[in-house]
Amino acid sequence: MRSIIQFSISREGGWYTAAAVGAPIVTQGKTLEEVSRNIREAVEVYLHGEDPQTLGFAPQPSLLANFEIPANA
């Protein structure tokens, strides 16, 4: 059972895209603040009405976001 839902954040075309690692959760935002809020909302929607344990998560998992910095930036 995982106690953390990890997200990988990348930027392309003026948008930040956040994709969960090992879960079907994806969201985006124009700023890092917006994508952070959208990650929380997307996780709430994903877990709504579900028992997190049946999805492999602890009852109240933490969120971890990693930001990808391109080498040529």
Image (spheres, rainbow, N blue to C red):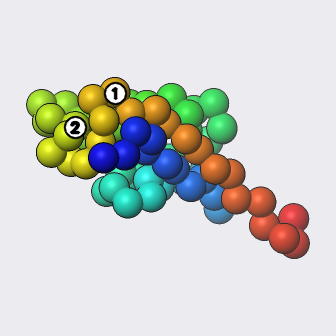
What's the residue at 63%, 30% (across, down)?
33
Amino acid marked by disc 2:
Pro
What's the residue at 21%, 48% (across, down)?
55
Q: Do the residues labelled 2 and 1 touch (CB within 8 Å)?
A: yes
Q: Name the residue under label 2.
A: 52
Position of residue 35 measured from the top left corner of the image (x, y, whole percent): 55, 38
For residue 49, the mark is none
Res 10 seen here: yes
Label 1's element? strand
Position of residue 65 measured from the top left corner of the image (x, y, whole percent): 59, 44
Q: Name the residue under label 1.
A: 60
CA separation, marks 2 and 1? 8 Å
Say above or below: 17 vs 48: below
What's the residue at 70%, 59% (across, down)?
68
Say above or below: 48 vs 67: above
Amino acid marked by disc 1:
Gln
Q: In which quarter of the image is residue 41?
A: top left
